[in-house]
Image: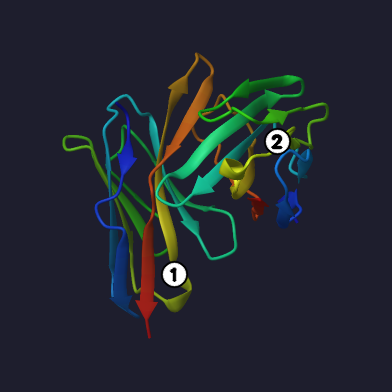
Amino acid sequence: EAQVTQNPRYLITVTGKKLTVTCSQNMNHEYMSWYRQDPGLGLRQIYYSMNVEATDKGDVPEGYKVSRKEKRNFPLILESPSPNQTSLYFCASSLFGSSYNSPLHFGNGTRLTVT
Amino acid sequence: GESVGLHLPTLSVQEGDNSIINCAYSNSASDYFIWYKQESGKGPQFIIDIRSNMDKRQGQRVTVLLNKTVKHLSLQIAATQPGDSAVYFCAEKKLSGGSNYKLTFGKGTLLTVNP
């Protein structure tokens, strides 16, 4: 089944403890992206990747890192999480980032709580 | 500034009725518009899209209308079913940074279908 898989689904951590949220897609998509979803603010892009070893900042990149060493994986790294990073995170992928009609496929989300 | 917004945050309809979800956008340079559906506990799911050079597109039970004169987008769902209950997001897509299509999401409308 074609899908975007995120892990974990739920994560509770403490301020400053490094964490990684994994994302994998099995559709051979070139483009991958991370979003956070907050009440009243909607979906905001954190980072995106046009292809392997090509990543760039989205609208809210502060406090996050990403890497794209392989086409299928796009982990989101929080080196020193803070409470304002408590949010619902979504990974998404599409065949191409440079094509207007390449729809995004989303994972089912990771609910992160930082205390 | 650019924005994608929604007229109504919630919409409640009776099963079998038609639903209309509205969206206003401010960036006339957007090339492409998409509607996503997000069910509870899941990531957004692509429903239907429309290019900026079109004013109407139909899918299965759904129709998207684009009025560029007033920068308005709507999603019509025919014979609404309980399974249509979800949050619906409009999104606009335009070229950003030369080669990347940036997707900007609206805040979402919660559709509740009453049996």
Image position, residue B87 (x, y; %): 43, 60
Q: Chain of mark 1?
A: B
Q: CA distance from mark 2 to mark 1?
A: 28 Å
User: What residue lies at 22% left-to-right and 35% top-to-bottom?
Assistant: B68
- In the shown orientation, is residue A36 left or right of residue B76? right
- Residue at which label 2 appears: A29
Quarter occupied by the C terminus of chain B: bottom left
Q: Is residue A13 left or right of residue A40?
A: right
On what subunit does the disc labeled 2 rest? Answer: A
Which residue lies at the image location 59% right of the left edge and 27% below the top edge? A62
Under circle 1, the secondary element is helix
What's the residue at 54%, 53% (across, down)? B44
Q: Residues within 10 Å of mark 2 (few under 14, many from 20)?
A: some
Residue farthest to the bottom, as pictured: B115
Q: Which residue is mark 1?
A: B84
Is residue A13 shown above or below B4? below
Q: Position of residue B88 (x, y in %)?
A: 41, 56
Which image quadrant for residue B91?
Answer: top left
Residue in front for this viewpoint, B50 or A39: A39
Q: Residue furthest top?
A: B98
- Under mark 2, the amino acid is His
Q: In the displayed structure, would residue B93 be above or below residue A85?
A: above
Looking at the rendered structure, whether the residues under marks 2 and 1 are on a common chain is answered as no
Amino acid at the residue labelled 1: Asp
Which disc is residue A69 wearing? Answer: none
Quadrant of the rendered image containing residue B67: top left
Q: Nearer the viewer, residue A27 or A24?
A: A24
Question: In this view of the protein, can residue A3 be seen by the observer?
Answer: no
**x then y, percent, for residue B64:** 33, 51
